[in-house]
Amino acid sequence: MNLLSLISSCLFLSLTLISIPLNSAQCIDQPYPTQPNIKLASKCLLVKKQPMKNVNYQVQNDTNMFVIQFNCEIKDITRCAKVKSSFEEAGLIISSTLILNTPILINAKFREMESAGILGAAGPYRTMPMKDDDGFERLYPQSLVKQFQLSVHPEFAPVDIIADFNSLIPFWFEGDPPITSQQIGFLELIIHELMHGLGFASSWNVYLDNFPEAATPEIVGLTTGTTLPDLNAKFVFNGFQESAFDKYLILLPENKLISSYANELNKFADFGTTYENAFDFLNQFVVSPQFLVAKEIFSSSISHVDSLTYTNTSEFLMTFSQEKGRTLNDNIRIGGNYAGGAIGHKLRLILESLGYATKESPNYKSPSPPDLPFNEDLNSSSWNNFSYKFYHTFVVGITIIMINYL
Ligand SMILES: [Zn+2]
C-alpha cells in the first residue's frame, strides 16, 4: 500500500459510500439533527402532484402554518407544555413574516441527551435537487419546495423539519421569572434553528475528513454514515452540489460568487465518470487543480452571519452563538426594536432570495424540477420559470469552518 492510498484509506474512515445510479437525483435525508453528518441518500424519483390549492384549508393572517408533532420524553409535564408552546409561538412568528401556502410539518423531540453540552438542533429532514435558472441543480429544503406547489417534484418525505432539543439545558421560556445569566432563551433558539430548517444553510463543508483544510459542496453519491465504505463498489462522480442558499453567497474580499468556485470544482471530471471506488476518486481529487480551489474556500463559515457585525443589531438571530441571559425580546430591543421583530430586514431578504414569498415580495421564486425521468406519464414539462430578483446575501464573516448547527 503506497502512501497515497494509506492517506485515502484514512480519509474516508467515517464515510459511507452509497452508490447512486447515473442520472439519478440524490435527495439527502438527515434524520438526526444533532448529528448532521449522518446523511442518508435516497433516489427521490419525480412524482406527480395534484395542485394543492387547499380548498378546506383557509389560510388567515394569523394561521400557524407549522404543524408540530411533539414528543416530550421527560416527566415534567409543565416544562413539556412550555416547550410545545414555544414551538407554536415560533411557528406563528415565522408564519407572520412569510406567506406560506402549505403547512410545514415539524417533528420535534425534547429529551435528556447524553451530554449537558448539547443544546439541540433542527434542520430539514430532506433536501432535494432542483434546477435553478442559472442551469445548476442545488439542494432545496422540502419545506420550501412544497410552497412552490409544482405539478411534478422529487418525492417528499413524511416530515419537513426535524428538531431535537436537550432537556438538560437551563432554558428560559416566555413567561418564566426573569432570565438568569446562565439561561438560554428557548424561543429565540427555536426560531434560529427553524431558519436552518427552512434553508438558511450552506452545503459547503469539510467532507474530506483527513483534509480539514479543504471545503467542498456536498459530494453527490457520498454520504457520511457510521460504517466503512464498500471498497469494491464503483464510485460514479456526479458532481459537487450546492444548496439553494449557496446560489447567492459571495466570497469576500474576492467579491466572487461562491457558486463560481463550485463550478470550478465540477470541472474535476465529467459527470458520470466511474472510479474504481471512493478512494480512487479521492486519490485523484486531492492531486487535481480543483483541490486547490477547495482549499481556497476553507476558512469561511457560511451558515451563519458574522457575529462581530450583527450581534446587538436587528440581524442578531442568525449569528453563530446565542447570548446567554437574554430573552428574545431583550435582543429585539437591543437591536433597535425592528418592526419585524426577530426576523430582521436582511434575513427576510435572504428568505425571499431563497424563494419564499413575503408580504413585501409576495411571489414565490420557484426553480424547476431536476432533469430526470419520473415514475408517471406526464403531458409536458412546461415548468414555470420565474425570474429571480437578485439580492446579495450580506456580508459573511471570515471565521473558521464550523458545523452548521448551534
Ligand atoms: Zn445555527
Image: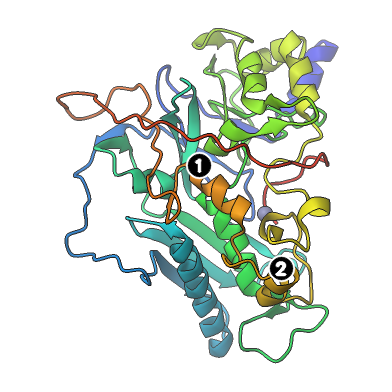
Gap in angstroms between the C-alphas marked 1 and 2: 26 Å
Residue 230 shows in the view? yes
In front of the other: 323 or 351: 351
Left or right: 325 in relation to 381: right
Mark 2: secondary structure: loop
- The spot of residue 129 in percent (x, y) is 44, 32
Mark 1: secondary structure: helix
Examine the rendered structure and indicate whether residue 199 appears above or below residue 371: below
- The spot of residue 376 in percent (x, y) is 19, 30
* Residue at image location 75% in from the left, 18% down from the top: 293
In front of the other: 199 or 314: 314
Lower sequence index among marks 1 and 2: 2
* Residue at image location 61% in from the left, 83% down from the top: 174
- The spot of residue 276 in percent (x, y) is 59, 10
Q: Amino acid at mark 2?
A: Gly
Taking the image in four quarters, ligand 1 sits in the one at bottom right
Q: Mark 1 vs ligand 1: CB under 8 Å?
A: no
| Residue occupied by mark 1 | 354
* Residue at image location 73% in from the left, 66% down from the top: 335
| Residue occupied by mark 2 | 336
| Quarter of image, res 12 | top right
* Residue at image location 58% in from the left, 64% down from the top: 191
Left or right: 191 in relation to 19: right
Image quarter (top left, top right, bottom left or bottom right) of the N terminus:
top right
Q: Amino acid at mark 1?
A: Leu
In front of the other: 268 or 382: 382
Examine the rendered structure and indicate whether residue 338 appears above or below residue 393: below
Image quarter (top left, top right, bottom left or bottom right) of the C terminus:
bottom right
Label 1 packing within 10 angstroms: few (<14), some (14-19), many (20+): many
